[in-house]
Image (cartoon, helix red, strand yellow):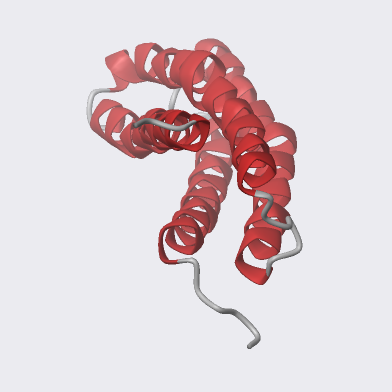
Amino acid sequence: MMTMYDVLKFLHVLLTIAAVGSNLTYGVWIGRAAREPRQLAFALRGVKILDDRIANPSYALLLITGFAMLYVRRISPTTPWILTSLVLYLVVLVVGLRGYTPVLRQQIAVLESGGPEAPEYQRLARRGLRLGVMLAVLVVVIVFLMVTKPALWG
């Protein structure tokens, strides 16, 4: 018999696939378009749409389904692997919303006004890449913690 926890866990995993899967495509979109500069604006706008409409809403719903699973199973959010994941989630949230999203928006604007060779675009592209890699590493660590549930610190 399927329990409420099973339904929440299924939704949680599905949302993880949507969020992380979307994020994993960004490098492909941008890297491919960098070799075909005429396609760069289209690719960046595509990444922005995926980020705004799929990845970010999925990450928000992940927090909700995660807390719902804790409630249903009566698991403390101070359990070390959960608390660590929540702290990393907050870091991802701040870096994503205050770092990556604004840089992506600026990249699109500068690309449209100055082109891909503009020094400002090149600076933003490097910053976007650094932020994207950092976010990807943090998200992989969170997924690792969620899957393995290690007994951290004892």
Q: Is residue 130 left or right of residue 86?
A: left
Which residue shows up at 49% across the image and 61% down it?
A: 141
Q: Is residue 107 visible?
A: no
Residue 35 is situated, as x and y percent measured from the top left of the image, at 23, 31
Q: Is residue 102 visible?
A: yes
Camera-nearest residue between 74 and 1 = 1
Residue occupying the point 62% across, 21% down: 105
Residue 51 lies, with reference to residue 151, above or below; the image says: above
Query: What count of labels does the image hold?
Result: 0
In the rendered image, which quarter contains the N terminus?
top left
Q: Nearer the viewer, residue 17 or 21?
A: 17
For the point 43% across and 26% down, the residue is: 116
- Locate residue 98 relative to residue 119 in the image: left or right: right
Q: Residue at x 69, y 66 (%)?
A: 79
Residue at the far front in the pictured view: 1
Question: Where does residue 18 sit, x and y in percent of width and height?
Answer: 39, 28
Q: Is residue 5 above or below residue 70?
A: above
Residue lying furthest bottom: 154
Choose between 77 and 35: the one closer to the eye: 77
9 sits left or right of 83 in the view? left
Q: Compare residues 107 and 141 and report the one nearer the observer.
A: 141
In the image, residue 68 lies at what x, y percent? 65, 35
Q: Residue 112: horizontal and vertical position, in percent? A: 52, 11
Q: Quadrant of the C terminus?
A: bottom right
